[in-house]
Image: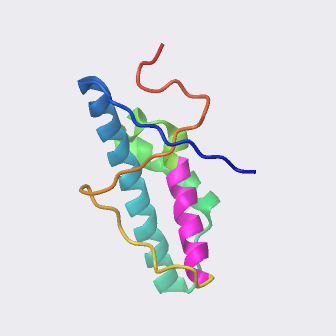
Amino acid sequence: MLKAVKVRIYPSEEQQSHLAQAFGCVRWVWNQSLATMSQTYKETGKGISALTMKKQIPVWKTEFEWLKECYSQCLQSSVLNLSQAFINFFDGRTRYPTFKKRHGKQSIQFPQNVKVLGGE
C-alpha cells in the first residue's frame, strides 16, 4: 500500500527566500533539460536518457554558480520527473511536456533524510 502525506507549512522570510531559490533552480534544470531533449530529438530522432541528463547537472553547476546552492537530489529528481513525463507522452497517457513558468504552482521534491532550511 502506498501512502502520501500532505503538509501545510508556514515558512519564515528566510525560508521563503531559500524555497524560492530552490524552486527557481529546479525549474531552470527542468526547462534546460526539456530544451536539450527536444532539440536532440529533432536533430537525431533519438531521445536522451535520464542518466545522461543527470550527468549534465555538474557541468551546469560549474557554468552557473547559483545552481550549487540547491540540493543536488532536488535537481536530479527534476530530471527523473521529466524523463517520466516523456515516457508517459510516448505511451499516449499525456501531452508533450511543457516548460515550467515562474508564476503558478511550484513544486519540489526533497529526499526524506535531508534537514531542510535550517531545521533543528
Q: Position of residue 15 (x, y in %)?
A: 32, 27
Q: Residue at x 45, y 46 (%)?
A: 108
Q: Residue at x 55, y 73 (%)?
A: 86
Q: Establish if 112 lies above or below 39.
A: above
Q: Nearer the viewer, residue 110 or 34?
A: 110
Magenta region, residue range:
76-90
* Rendered residue at 28%/32% (across/down): 16
Which scheme is used to colour this image of the protein? rainbow
15 relative position to 113: left or right? left
Residue 36 vs residue 104: left or right?
A: right
Q: Is residue 65 above or below residue 107?
A: above
Q: Quadrant of residue 18?
A: top left
Q: Is residue 80 magenta?
A: yes
Identify the residue at image location x=35%, y=51%: 106
Q: Nearer the viewer, residue 89 or 48?
A: 89
Provide residue 1's location: percent of width, then percent of height: 75, 51
Q: Which quadrant would residue 39 be assigned to in this image? A: bottom left
The picture places residue 102, in percent across and down from the top left corner, at 26, 55
Vertically, is 4 above or below 97?
A: above
Q: Which SS type dominates the magenta stretch?
A: helix
Quick check: 32 left or right of 82?
A: left
Horizontal and vertical percent position of residue 116: 47, 27
Tell which residue pokes out farthest to the top in this image.
Answer: 120
Extreme residue in the right direction: 1
